[in-house]
Image: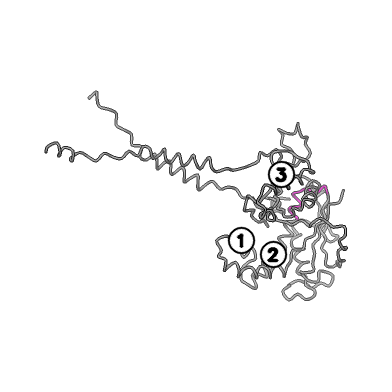
Amino acid sequence: MSKFNKKKSGDLPAISTASLPDIVFMLLFFFMVATVMRENTLMVKNDLPTANQIEKLDKKDLVMYIYAGEPVDRFKGVYGSSAKIQLNDKISDVSQIQDFIYEERASKREELVPFLTTALKVDGDSNMGLISDIKQELRKANALKINYVTKSGDAVEAND
Amino acid sequence: MAKRSAPEVNAGSMADIAFLLLIFFLVTTTIETDSGISRKLPPELDENMPPPPVIKERNLFTVIVNSNDELLVEDKVMELKDLRAAAVEFLDNGAEDCSYCQGAKDPNSSVNPTKAIISLVNNRGTSYKRYIAVQNELVAAYNQLRDRVAQERYGESFIAMEARYNDPRTSDANKDKLKPKLELIRELYPEKLSEAEPKKS
């Protein structure tokens, strides 16, 4: 009987929680890996202008980005210092915009194509000549919904 | 005594620390959404299209931006900060058939907001920054008028109504109620902003 008693009197062994952190870290790593924040490496200067009458661009999958501006210092040697357009990860020419739009369209589901918006992320110091060239190309490609991406803030103050 | 093993470190709270980190990052990571001024480009011109109707000079509000970023509004030099007020004055003039306008009813200015057109001309040398600022002010003029008429009729600003309409949390029934109101306001002050192709300097 004494054997029996001995067992009962002992404390319940604590469940080891040492592996719980591993489980949580596994979760953490899973989310860290699964969250893809696709961001193009910018090769052009991109100091956006300021405006306050703005609308949010949600539904990221329905947005095509066109960047424009002067190449950053690192790429000035290759591309020169006049304003350039960046499509995906390449510095491109205005004439390549149409192909870019068609490619983007082809990669989307067909019923979503009419809702595609082109977001223009253009450096504030570029000239309108470049932007109107882009707009002409977009008109030719029939991509008529555009959005000038801006920072929020007072436009008048920013221009003084 | 020498045989006593080192006491085990309690690792139970490690999980709490890890959870804390996880929750902190979950809460603070905002995947940045872009925002900007939305515009619609005109479709490509068709050669066979009939020529556009002639617009009376009084219904046209011309804004010209030159390559030095200076503004010429209705043939007068103007500062950017005055543009919004000038545009509002022009749009809200309401010389004929406009019960909701509060303008001066100047016979030389626009007939009513549905006829009034703002024409924006810029130069190839205009800076993008200035172009966006001008666009912003013109959109602000429309929004100001729409807000006013929405406030009068529904006691809520147009921007707030639009935000509520676009909010996914708004129920469909509410959306159906909002839609005709928004459409009515858009009809009262339609956004008629025409952009000419930029001139070569």
Residue kind at label 3, given as amino acid type:
Tyr
Residue B117: x and y, percent? 80, 64
The residue pinned by badge 3 equals: A67
The residue pinned by badge 2 equals: B144
Whether tag 1 and tag 2 are in contact, CB under 8 A, the answer is no
Q: Chain of mark 2?
A: B
Indicate whether residue A130 is drawn in magenta: no
Magenta span of residues:
B124-134
First in residue order: circle 1 vs circle 2: 2
- Label 3 Cα neighbours within 10 Å, binned few <14 / some 14-19 / many ≥20: many
How far apart are labels 2 and 3 at the CA level? 31 Å
Residues marked 3 and 1, same chain? no
Visible residue check, residue B118: yes
Identify the element where label 3 is drawn.
Answer: strand
Decide if residue A152 is on the left or right side of residue B7: right
Residue B7: x and y, percent? 29, 31
The residue pinned by badge 1 equals: B166
